[in-house]
Amino acid sequence: MSAHPQDKAAGDARKPMTLPRLAEMNAAGEPIVMVTAYDHPSAQVVEQAGVDIVLVGDSAAMTVLGYDSTVPVGMDEMLMLAAAVRRGLVTPFLIGDMPFGSYEQSNEQAVANAQRFVKEAGCDAVKLERGGASVDRARAIVRAGIPVMGHVGLTPQTATALGGYKAQGRTAGRASQIAEEALALQAAGCFAIVFEAVPAAVTEALMPRMEIPVIGIGAGADTDGQVLVFHDLLGIFGGHAPKFVKRYADVRGEMVAGVSEYAGEVRSGAFPAPEHIYSIEPAELAEFRAYLDQETLPSGTFSHADWDWGP
Ligand code: KIV
């Protein structure tokens, strides 16, 4: 097992990320690095890598839970993942992604579920998708004292209504809608916002109106920061990767190679080798063998035929 105190020590030299520090970075034009994480080991990795913001994204639905979209994942699943990430982080700012169905009904529902991310999983903030009614939900959560990140452009929770997983804002009308949503979320008190799958030129045109940090994913190079999905950037997720993903590693290939080698060595008898085996003093072993030779030891094996299946 890994040594947690050492991993934590990696983050100790850096100060925990806060909202004022994020605002300072933004004002100074320092790029903000955001990445997703979904469990304790991935949290330790992103901690050590020194990212600024960690999102427990509802992309977990697809990357770690095996659903075919983000829609089915629920609050309890997201909270379990977020709590595991929290236990692996020291410095980055931690955001819990509010899953589909956890905030749309009413401001009360949105506040109650945002509070669960903070109280039960130790998140610093929550993220929700879209403009429209989500602007009201964001305002209510901010008023309840919980920082909110917005998310516009391609919003996967409502991808069906948007015509599928495709770039948004490619017409003047749709770009204006995205601008309206972004500005409304900013006015509602969001501390930052994600632009997903938006033409770079639309982002560039909109940036002068954005006072809060804009974190892009497929939104060009003019945003204040970038976010990628952990499993996409490391090449762990085997599914289709969108155009905006850059793969920095082939971890899935490494994992398959490692497990295949292990399987091969178990089958050939090469594993375990002497260095993986515990020893026992010869005298202790002799005494144990003598014990096994006793005739009074129970014998026979269990058979399901012996089971009493009842009346
Ligand atoms: O769920 C997620 O991972 C996200 C990011 C892509 C921003 O929303």
Image: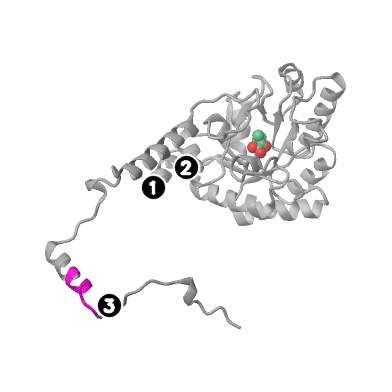
* Nearest-to-viewer mark from 1 and 2: 1
Q: Are marks 2 and 3 in contact (CB under 8 Å)?
A: no
Secondary structure, mark 3, is: loop
Q: Residue at x 62, y 39 (%)?
A: 19
Label 3 within 8 A of ligand 1 by Cβ: no
Residue 161 x %, y %: 83, 35
Q: Are marks 1 and 2 in contact (CB under 8 Å)?
A: yes
Q: Quadrant of residue 136?
A: top right
Q: Residue at x 72, y 28 (%)?
A: 211
Q: Is residue 90 left or right of residue 219?
A: left
Other residues around mark 1 within 10 Å, as few (<14) / some (14–19) / many (≥20): few
Position of the C terminus, as image quadrant, is bottom right
Residue under label 3: 297
Q: Label 3 amino acid?
A: Leu
Q: Quadrant of residue 139?
A: top right
Residue under label 1: 2
Other residues around mark 2 within 10 Å, as few (<14) / some (14–19) / many (≥20): many
Span shown in magenta:
289-295
